[in-house]
Amino acid sequence: MLGPNPATLLRRVTCRLILVVLGLVCVRAAAATPAPEITAERQEVTERGAVFSGHVQFRDEDLLLTADRAEYDTASDTVTASGHVVYTRGSVRLLADKIVVHRTTRTFAANSIRLGSYPYYIEGSSAQGNRNEITVMHARVTYGEPGPWQPTARADVITVEPATKRIRTEGAQVGIGPALPLPFPKLQQSLGDPLLSGVTMTGGYRGSLGAYLDGGIRLPVAPGIKVGGDLGYYTARGLLFGPGATYTNPTDPDSLHGLFRSGYINDHGDKKTDILGRPVPENRGFVEWEHVQSINDHLTLNGELNYWRDSEVLRDFRPREFFPVQQPDNFVEATYANANSFVSVFTRFAPNSFELVQQRLPEVRFDLLPIALPGGFVERFNASLAELREDPLPTSPATITLLGAPPSPASSAAAASWTTRSPMPDGPLVPLRATRLDAYYSVMRPIAPTKWFTLSPVVGARVTNYSDTAGAPQSGGYTRTLGEVGADAELRTSGTFAYQNDAWHIDGLRHLFTPKISYRYIPEAEKGQAYIPAIDRETFSTYLQPLGLGDVRNIDELHATNTLRLEFDNALQTHDGKAGTRDLLTFNVADDFRFHREPGQRDASEIQTELAAMPARWLEFGLYNSFDPQTFTLREFNSGITIRDGRAWTVRFANNFLRHQLQDYLVDARARLNEQYDVLAQLRYDQTKHRFTEQSYGIVQNLANTWRVSYLVSFYSGRSRESGFGFSIQIDTVRF
């Protein structure tokens, strides 16, 4: 290998000698500041210092400066560079026509700059800054490379904070490409977020709404706070508008986050009737607020507010938000947790007039987690004091209205999350009120003769007092005392198999088989029903309910229990290099055997079966089944299978079946055509009506890696409010 060119070597040696001489004559030679390193093709010593030209490189600690020409002033300890200047410090890279670097103060000033700090591009007339921040004057900032579709802001001043990865603006105008219609006095934005990450836009046509254009924006005004609003115009309805905001803790989003949105419209279209058959009012609106906060290691605060002026306002104007949750909830809860207990204050209120709500105004609760006692015993205790209230509906519906099929579940949890959108037909006809003091205590004695078997006998008692109950046998209310005895047994077995399959990423198999038996005897649980307002009562569910007296939620409407539950849990696992183990299949079966039955009940409940299979990353299958063994009747069957080929395509087949209620099928498919376009289709077929209730076909476009534009055509059949045809164009920001 040849050594360096002698001329080049001589220039480098000369350059270093010049720096040594400059350091000796510099007034600040005695200071601790280390000398910089400068290399160039040519150098010249002057009275003030030195001049370097030709591929100049200036290195000073973490700073790298390249230019065509540079002057070093020993008196002021500054470097002035010009011609194709590139200033690099950490993740910040700045290009300029001219720059002056002050070594003593670690500051700089530059003209005609271009600044890159991924994913932002900033240009301006001048800039000055230091290690912590850079201020750009008369600036323009673009998310990504400048282009006609990129989010852009023009501002009098833009300040970049490389350490905190944030930018601030003053006197800004925000928009897309050259169009900057939105004035905004101040913006604060994380460098990791798109400039217009809170922008949504939808346009299209629906027969019930007419042609419409609906948009929303949330702009950052402070660290973690974005403020804006939503605005939509519907030719058949009018103008819908309202403010909105999101907030979070910028340093720890899990500790605090929330959102607020609202809308108001003077609806001049065909509004029809609400869920109770009442005319929908002309002035319509909604307010929604969600809040999740961990105040410290012990105290958390959660809340949710959903005020709807009428039951159909979100269904008409915000269907994507409405159909997943058709009955809004309103609550605030504060919880204080210790090592083995927690105290909570929970309030549920009813701002809406179209739904039944079991209000708690409030409920104060104490829970003692299971604690070991001498002799191997384990105790459990909880107590609560609640002011309960439930107001009747203005009109009781005669039937339950189904507003479309539930989502196809891959597990019982997904199936349980779906509810029909209807107040309870058996709700109260008069207001219900109760002040309830409730306490539960139990003692368990786990017996584990081996590592693979555990038997836990349990005894417990629950005392509930209802104050000022109408018709109570004694003044001041009614007190109910109940006891329970029972046991829980669990047998844990396992087996391993040396099976390998590279195609399915299987590295050995382990089968876990866990039979469980639970028994509870709770006699005379229905006593006192004549005096107890049935506020926390039974609700419709196709799943086995908790057996234990301390776990049931319908404590105002209990029934005597003498039940044995048999359950078999299976899990098939394989070794996973990242997660340790990976479930390939879970299969659980459970059934109740009732020695005491309520009217209409059978000796045995329906057999509940859950199956979830994930044998490979490209295949998922889920199933829930409820089967009556005495009549050989299938009561409920929900299933879903998803097949995917990486990012190329995904298809899902699913069904929902609930005897005498629902039977539908779903196909949901998506395929990638190229880097820009995806196609999608969704079909839902109602077997009971022999028709497609929904057909949706669309194209999704990736625009400049910043916007996701969805073009969707939909056809509906059987819905009472929506029209049969809809077309929409929706624009969302792409999240990185």
Image (cartoon, grey):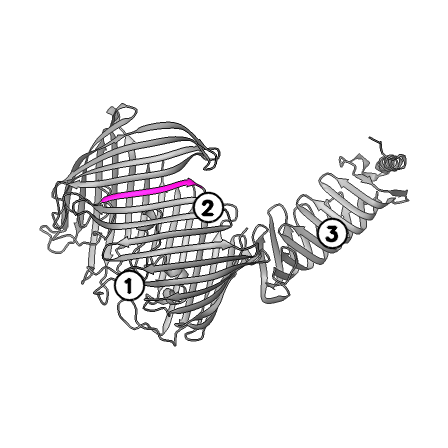
Residues at marks 1 and 3, CA–CA distance in whole angstroms: 67 Å
Quadrant where the image shows the N terminus? top right
Q: Residues within 10 Å of mark 2 (few under 14, many from 20)?
A: few
Residue placed under numbered mark 2 in the picture: 254
Does the magenta portion include 612?
yes
**In the image, residue 221 lies at what x, y percent?**
55, 58
Magenta part mainly helix, strand or loop?
A: strand
Give the SS element for disc 1. loop
Q: Residue at point 55% right, 50% down? A: 736
Secondary structure under the numbered disc 3 in the rendered image: strand
Find disc 1 in the rendering and name its residue: 689
Which residue is nearer to you in this view: 204 or 117?
204
Amino acid found under the numbered disc labelled 3: Leu
* Mark nearer the N terminus (1 vs 3): 3
The residue carrying mark 3 is: 95
Q: Residue at x 45, y 44 (%)?
A: 618
Question: Are discs 3 and 2 less than 8 Å apart at CB?
Answer: no
* Extreme-left residue of the structure: 473
Q: Which residues are magenta?
A: 607-616
